[in-house]
Image (tube, rainbow, N blue to C red):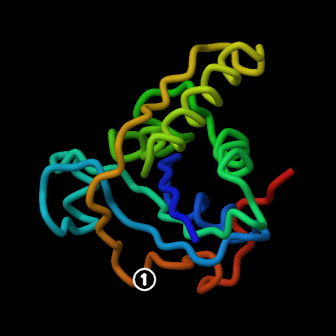
Amino acid sequence: MEKATFAAGCFWGVESAFRKLMGVLSTQVGYTGGKKDNPTYEEVCTSSTQHVEAIEVVYDPCFISYEELLNTFWDIHDPTTLNRQGFDIGSQYRSAIFYHNSNQERLAKESRKKQNESGRFDDPIVTEIIPASKFWKAEEYHQKYYEKKGTRGCDLN
């Protein structure tokens, strides 16, 4: 089993999209990339902690590759908007890939370069690619939010 960590806006929809992938064993939403231990949702929403809403994915590389996870990441959000996804505005909604090893770093950078060169996006990609840091699990009511609410969340193409 391996771990991947992504930030692509509000973590509810991000988690919903990744949970639907064959080979993803578990997900949890939370906060990473910030300066405060054990931040709360309310603190992260102020942008003062510098955390980002993120998802931690545990996956089986025998069934799904890191490259496939990266493809999903690019498909579910706009990586060209700084500190924003749709109506959600603030540094906690920034686009980021948090790599757990040098192979993930290399693949993420290659993937970002390929996406930038593809012509798919009108503007340059602003997605950060940085080392994974402490991941703080979000409050329980945020976990599997769309499943709990009985809504579909993100549909993948």
* Residue 71 percent coordinates (x, y): 72, 43
Residue at screen point 42% across, 83% down: 141
Front-most of residues 107 and 120: 107
Classify residue 13 by image quadrant.
bottom right
Front-most of residues 86 and 2: 2
Q: Residues within 10 Å of mark 1 (few under 14, many from 20)?
A: few
As drawn, is 41 to the left or to the right of 150? left
Badge 1 element: helix
Classify residue 102 by image quadrant.
top left
Residue at screen point 72% across, 54% down: 65
Residue at screen point 61% across, 14% down: 123
As drawn, is 69 to the left or to the right of 43? right
Front-most of residues 62 and 23: 62
The N terminus, quarter of image: bottom right
Farthest residue, direction right: 157
Is the residue 76 above or below the residue 137 in the image? above
Residue at screen point 50% across, 51% down: 6
Amino acid type, mark 1:
Tyr
As drawn, is 82 to the left or to the right of 1? left
* Residue 121 percent coordinates (x, y): 70, 20
* Residue 39 percent coordinates (x, y): 19, 65
- Residue pointed to by mark 1: 141
Is the residue 41 above or below the residue 80 in the image? below
* Residue 124 percent coordinates (x, y): 57, 15
Is the residue 104 above or below the residue 128 in the image? below
